Amino acid sequence: MADQITTVSERRLTDKLATLSLEDLMAVEAAIGIQLDLDLVKEE
């Protein structure tokens, strides 16, 4: 899903194009965690 991670200045984000579903948002979070070698397991 994510081969590379790039940052963007908030000033360049002017218009909202879409909204991610919770499922898609979780997939993005997981992909970022893999790329950054993070342990994103949430403790209850």
Image: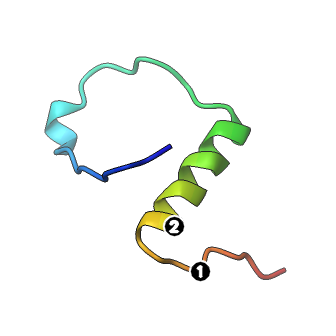
Q: Determine whether the residue tagged by mark 2 lies in a helix, strand or loop.
A: helix
| Residue carrying label 2 | 33
Task: Give the camera-side residue of 40 and 18.
Answer: 40
Residue placed at 68% from the left, 32% from the top? 21
Here the colouring is rainbow
Q: Is residue 33 above or below residue 28?
A: below
List x then y, in percent, for residue 18.
49, 20
Identity of the amino acid at label 2? Gly
The quadrant of the picture occupied by the C terminus is: bottom right
- The answer for how far apart the CA atoms under marks 1 and 2 are is 7 Å
* Few, some or many residues within 10 Å of mark 1 (<14, 14–19, 20+): few
Labelled pair 1, 2 in contact (Cβ < 8 Å): yes
Residue shown at 70%/76% (left/top)?
41
Q: Which residue is mark 1?
A: 39
44 to the left or right of 15: right
Instruction: Say what amino acid the circle numbered 1 marks.
Output: Asp
